[in-house]
Amino acid sequence: MDGLLATVQQWIPVDVLFGLAVAGGIGFIGSLIAIPLILVRLPADYFDTRTPRHWMKNHHPVLRLLGLVIKNVVGVVFVLAGFAMLFLPGQGLLTMLIGVSLVDFPKKRELEAKMVGQPTLLGVINAMRKKFDKPPLILAPDP
């Protein structure tokens, strides 16, 4: 183990390794708190592709544009953090799902529905929602 640590320290300074460890710990704890809160607060039909979504529909166009930029940047951060959590401690798939739901791109709703429609992930999300007395997520039937 000491040989591995010495090899890694040749390429990455100890301060950076320590910073990555602290960031990973903070990300892990943050994901344990934030992800369930977000998934529980979503409407039951949020991932149903038959239900239209209009974000900030009744706001001023400049405020809407600013909000969309911020939402997309936060979404990209969540997707990257979720990808990192696939290899580090944390809820990687759930974090990536939140990130994908924040970022705007063509066919996003179909990708979200496909991700959430995976039986294991849907089961975890609905179990979380049940603990907080929220109804299970509703998904559109496959065509």
Image: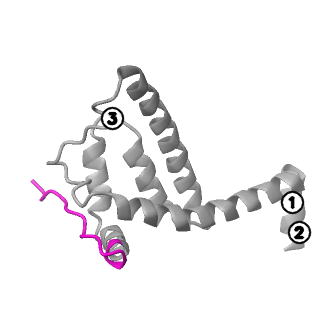
User: Which amino acid type is shown beneath numbered disc 2?
Assistant: Gly
Q: Nearer the viewer, residue 25 or 134?
A: 134
Residue 58 image position (x, y, % from top left): 28, 31
- Residue annotated with mark 2: 3
* Residue 128, placed above or below residue 56: below
User: Which amino acid type is shown beneath numbered disc 1?
Assistant: Thr
- Residue annotated with mark 1: 7
* Position of residue 4 in the picture relative to residue 61 (left or right): right
Disc 3 secondary structure class: loop
**Magenta-drawn stretch contains 138:** yes
Which span is picked out in magenta?
129-143
- Residue annotated with mark 3: 56
Decide which of tag 3 and tag 2 comes sooner along the chain.
Answer: 2
- Numbered disc total: 3
Residue 39 image position (x, y, % from top left): 38, 62
Q: Nearer the viewer, mark 3 or mark 2?
A: 3
| Alpha carbons under labels 3 and 2: distance apart | 54 Å
Q: Quadrant of residue 17?
A: bottom right
Q: Nearer the viewer, mark 1 or mark 3?
A: 3
Residue 119 image position (x, y, % from top left): 28, 71
Q: Nearer the viewer, residue 95 or 135?
A: 135
Mark number displayed over residue 95: none
* Residue 120, placed above or below residue 138: below
Can residue 46 be seen by looking at this rendering?
yes
**The N terminus - image quarter:** bottom right
Disc 1 secondary structure class: helix
Instruction: Look at the numbered discs 1 and 2 and tell me whether their residues touch, using CB distance below 8 Å.
Output: yes
**Label 3: how many Cα within 10 Å (few below 14, some 14–19, many 20+):** few
